[in-house]
Amino acid sequence: MKHMSAEHHVPTIDESTVECGTESLAPPYTPPPTPSYLDLCHSGELLHRVEALEALLERCTICPRDCLNNRIKDEIAACYSGRLPIVSSYTPHFGEEPPLVGTHGAGNIFFGNCNLRCVYCQNYQISQTHKAQIQNEVTHDRLARMMLELQGRGCHNINFVSPTHFAPQMARAILLAAQQGLRLPVVYNTNAYDSVEVLRLLDGIVDVYLPDLKYAENDAGYLYSKVKGYKDYARLALKEMYRQTGDELVFGADGLLKRGLVIRLLVLPNDIGGVRESLEWIRDELSPRVAISLMAQYYPTNVAGTNSRYVLLSRRLRESEWLRALSALDELGMAEGWMQEYDGAAYYYRPDFSDSSRPFKDIRDFE
Ligand code: SF4
């Protein structure tokens, strides 16, 4: 397992482009290998998938909450999200795992709102402020152009952050962007409270799955993220992601990640996440070779630092707790993936979305 500050590789430039329906915008460079959504685009399958995903919005079952509201008519429910995507910020980002960041950054697109309500959400300024976020609604075409812009700025992938509740809108925008020259791998950076039906429809559209596995107990998910059955649904979702990708990570000649599954485990104070239990489940039910991203960046934010109900989450992680998580990885033989540094992690990754063009301090500012 490598540290998050591992050396970055310099990407090579591949000028090849693949036409897909309409005129190409000829992006400045396109890294190999070709993302699989291009094949789906050429065959017409991508359009079928988009339409099947959009049909789920009519009685919304996009995530396991199964609200059954008609989002095509902008009826909103638990995630406060209707027909159009909401984008709170899009920017090159240097705080993800090294093979996603490279030299030019991951191309992050932060969706507004969320299907969870984590009391410690570090992105609460955009995930739990739906009255403000409605101002950030964009058309599918605008979302596609954001992706092309990030590609034009040299980002190595399109990293959709909290995409679950906007999976159909994301897929529609990928179709539009692919038709106009998008060639970057698509990363699905999710809280894992995802529907298996939706994930099956995303097979071949998403190149890299980057899910959290937040808890090993449903009760913790209910208390701290306000959803029922988090552990059960997230584990089903991870099984489906694993079915699609297996445990092999595919890297390009540039050393950057092009395809695969990386499971993020954020170590919480007082072992609220049950890291060892989750690791045991991954090892036994998926594979001991699945890549793990172990994260030390927890700090009390949102209501975790102020509401006494969440007192167990009201402090930073202790070094002894971090070392216990590292021992669990070691003892269980989970050697693939990355880990953050304990020192400073809580500062590197603190966003402030009041500056939507640069919500994260550049991790390189600290090096
Ligand atoms: S995506 Fe939103 S509206 Fe649809 S089921 Fe989930 S929380 Fe409910």
Image: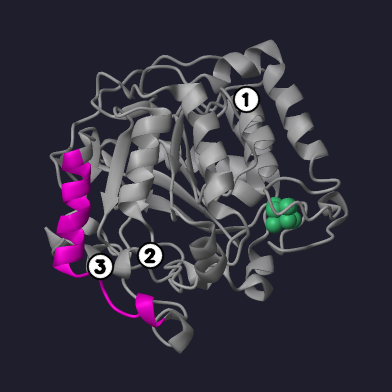
Q: Which mark is residue 98?
A: none
Cα distance, mark 2 to mark 3? 17 Å
Q: Which mark is residue 179?
A: 1
Label 1 is placed on what type of residue?
Answer: Gln
Question: Is residue 311 positioned above or below 259 on the image?
Answer: below
Task: Please give left or right for residue 349 compared with residue 137 in the image.
Answer: left
Label 3 is placed on what type of residue?
Answer: Ala
Cα distance, mark 2 to mark 1? 44 Å
Label 2 is placed on what type of residue?
Answer: Ile
> Which is more foreground, mark 2 or mark 3?
2
Residue 132 lies in quadrant: bottom right
Magenta residues (range): 311-331
Cα distance, mark 1 to mark 3? 40 Å
Task: Please give left or right for residue 12 compared with residue 360 in the image.
Answer: left
> Which is more foreground, mark 1 or mark 3?
3
Find residue 335 and report its horizontal and vertical position in percent: 20, 34
As helix, strand or loop, the secondary structure at mark 2 comes to loop
Of the numbered discs 2 and 1, the one sitting upstream in the chain is 1
Q: Callout 2 environment at 10 Å: few (<14), some (14 to 19), or many (20+)? A: some
Of the numbered discs 1 and 3, the one sitting upstream in the chain is 1
Task: Please give left or right for residue 166 compared with residue 25 in the image.
Answer: right
Quadrant of image for the N terminus? top left
Q: Residue furthest top?
A: 43
As helix, strand or loop, the secondary structure at mark 1 comes to helix
Question: Is residue 277 positioned above or below 268 on the image?
Answer: above
Find residue 288 and report its horizontal and vertical position in percent: 30, 29
Q: Is residue 81 magenta?
A: no
